[in-house]
Image (cartoon, helix red, strand yellow):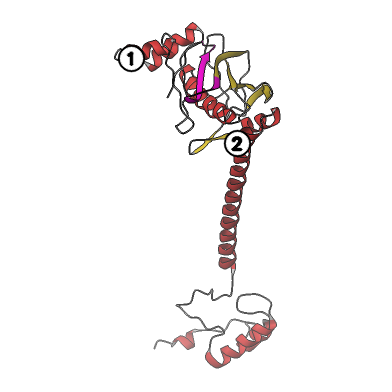
């Protein structure tokens, strides 16, 4: 005849009874933490209901009483909020500094304000224009009405890229300077690093490794402001481009279908002019060689 489970079960030698186990762990709660008061309540509940802790299966609370999840969630949310606050504050401060630089050029042109504008950028259109990190200020004097600066482009990979970026930078910087009633001429020199083969050398490793070697003059933008009965004229003369670079720019920006007028403008054979009254849009300009002027 088979024995019942109760008969088959044997009590282990020296095993603790329920009461003895309760007494041994009377200061330890069911999560394993030493908490005599909580342990006492749990023992009382076990005697009455057979369980020490009420567990709600629909509750988000951890039955063990651990709050690690809440701490992690609060820490993550706090980190995100602090990061967003830092980003917003940095953007606001950066915008204020840039606007301050732009306002300084319109009202006060000195070596310090010009250097600050080149370092922080100036407003142009709906945004801001940055300038190369390496620059120098040769002149910034409201008495002579002239501003002359030199920048070293270390990001452009070829002549076309340098010409395109420098034209935007020179326009933004010069127009902001010419808004000052005491400034009539702005000279913006652009230098580059070239190797022995005439190739542009650029900064590496996110700009931390600067190119070495000789610095070569690439192009110069000369902006001037004149006043006539028709209004205020903003003119731009582009100088300093040698014949080799002229031919390279011509080959890169033109095709066999390009109109002759544009071909001539690239080499500086034609000249266009334009002006604007004080109520019209400012006219800017550029040609590919020494003495050409134009309007946009």
> Which quadrant does the N terminus fall into?
bottom left
218 or 53: nearer the viewer: 218
Q: Is residue 232 above or below residue 84?
A: above
Q: Is residue 217 above or below residue 7?
A: above
Is residue 86 visible from the viewing direction of this image? yes
* Residue extent of the magenta highlight: 223-241
Residue 176 covered by magenta stretch: no
Name the residue located 49 percent from the left edge and 24 percent from the top edge: 229
Which residue is identified by label 1? 255
Is residue 206 visible from the viewing direction of this image? no
Point out residue 158 in the picture as x, y percentages from the top left corner: 48, 18
Is 83 displayed left or right of 26 in the figure?
left
Residue 235 covered by magenta stretch: yes
> Which quadrant does the C terminus fall into?
top left
Report which quarter residue 113 is drawn in: top right
10 Å crowding of disc 2: few (<14), some (14-19), many (20+)? many
Which residue is identified by label 2? 102
Point out residue 139 in the picture as x, y percentages from the top left corner: 68, 21
Name the residue located 60 percent from the left edge and 36 percent from the top edge: 102
Is 16 displayed left or right of 295 in the figure?
right
Point out residue 203 in the picture as x, y percentages from the top left corner: 58, 24
Which numbered disc flags the more N-terminal residue, 2 or 1? 2
| Majority secondary structure of magenta residues | strand
């Amino acid at each position: 005849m088979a024995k019942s489970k109760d008969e088959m079960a044997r009590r282990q030698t020296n095993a603790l009874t329920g009461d003895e186990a309760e007494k041994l762990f009377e200061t330890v709660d069911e999560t394993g933490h030493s908490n005599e008061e909580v342990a006492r309540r749990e023992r009382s509940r076990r005697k009455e209901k057979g369980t020490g802790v009420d567990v709600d299966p629909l509750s988000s609370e951890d039955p063990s009483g651990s709050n690690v999840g809440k701490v992690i969630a609060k820490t993550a949310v706090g980190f995100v909020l602090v990061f967003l606050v830092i980003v917003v504050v940095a953007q606001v401060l950066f915008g204020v500094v840039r606007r301050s630089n732009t306002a300084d050029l319109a009202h006060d042109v000195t070596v310090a304000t010009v250097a600050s504008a080149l370092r922080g950028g100036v407003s142009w259109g709906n945004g801001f224009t940055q300038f190369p990190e390496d620059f120098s200020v040769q002149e910034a004097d409201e008495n002579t009405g002239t501003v002359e600066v030199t920048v070293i482009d270390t990001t452009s990979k070829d002549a076309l890229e340098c010409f395109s970026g420098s034209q935007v930078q020179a326009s933004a910087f010069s127009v902001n300077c010419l808004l000052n009633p005491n400034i009539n001429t702005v000279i913006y020199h652009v230098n580059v690093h070239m190797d022995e083969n005439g190739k542009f050398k650029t900064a590496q490793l996110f700009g931390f490794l600067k190119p070495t070697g000789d610095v070569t003059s690439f192009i110069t933008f000369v902006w001037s402001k004149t006043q006539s009965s028709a209004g205020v004229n903003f003119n731009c003369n582009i100088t300093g481009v040698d014949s080799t670079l002229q031919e390279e720019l011509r080959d890169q920006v033109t095709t066999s279908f390009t109109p002759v007028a544009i071909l001539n403008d690239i080499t500086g054979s034609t000249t266009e002019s334009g002006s604007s009254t004080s109520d019209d849009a400012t006219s800017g300009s550029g040609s590919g060689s020494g003495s050409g002027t134009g309007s946009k």
